[in-house]
Amino acid sequence: MTAPAAAVTLPRAARSPGWWGMLAFMATETTLFGVLLGSYFYLRVHALTWPPPGVPHPAATVPLILSAVLFVTVLPVHLASRWASNGLLNPCRLALLVAFVVQCGYVAMTIHLYSDDITTLQPVSTGVYSSIYLTLVGADIAHVLVGLLLSAWFLLRLASGLTRYRVAGVQSIALYWYFVCVLTVVVTVVSVAPTL
């Protein structure tokens, strides 16, 4: 009588140091935005009116739509990560490129809205509301720009093929974009909340 075959268990693939580094970076950025959001709510709770009289309410419709569009780019970024892991170079590049183009459109529109906000709110003369609003939204835009730079770098690197390093890089970028997209939705909802 033969003994039953033992179940074969494959070792779980270890995460790359780049992935862990991105996770640590996101933890520090979560702290930064926690402080900014805490400051925003502290100032809001202690203000008699929010925004103060004479300061226009932030527009809600366009920023919410833009945030939803950015959030949808999580899908092609996720697919790019999966396809890179499976060694599928062309689909990975195409998915990253689609996400990159949409994200560039998001940044262009958001920077346009942000420059209008700076002109309208004039943080020096309108007080703490304008300062915390512009800081919160500006920090979010900066994080999206960092994501674009990372994506552009790896799109260029993928032009010469996939390596283990590049697969880990695409996975790290995907992790960063998950974080940035969720962060953008939170910042947008908080910043337009006085309008809703």
Image: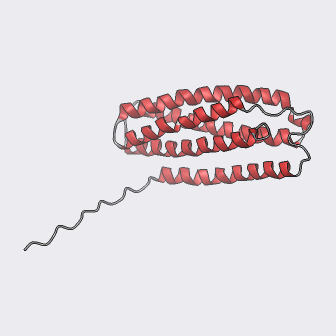
Hey, which quadrant is residue 164 in on the image? top left
Quadrant in which the C terminus is drawn? top right
Tell me which residue sits at (87%, 32%) in the image: 122
Residue 145: in sight, yes or no?
no
Colour scheme of the picture: secondary structure
9 vs 113: above or below: below
Lateral position of residue 38 relative to residue 108, left or right: right
* Residue at the bottom extreme, as displayed: 1
* Residue at the left extreme, as displayed: 1
Residue 113: in sight, yes or no?
yes
98 and 15: which is toward the camera: 98
How many labels sit on residues? 0
Q: Residue 52's spot in the image, x, y percent?
A: 90, 39
Tell me which residue sits at (64%, 41%) in the image: 185
Q: Residue 126's spot in the image, x, y percent?
A: 90, 36
Tell me which residue sits at (33%, 60%) in the image: 11
Q: Residue 18's spot in the image, x, y percent?
A: 49, 50
110 and 57: which is toward the camera: 57
Hey, which quadrant is residue 13 in on the image? bottom left
Q: Residue 147's spot in the image, x, y percent?
A: 58, 38
Lateral position of residue 99 relative to residue 191, left or right: left
28 vs 142: above or below: below
Tell me which residue sits at (71%, 52%) in the image: 34
Quadrant in which the N terminus is drawn? bottom left
Hey, which quadrant is residue 162 in on the image? top left
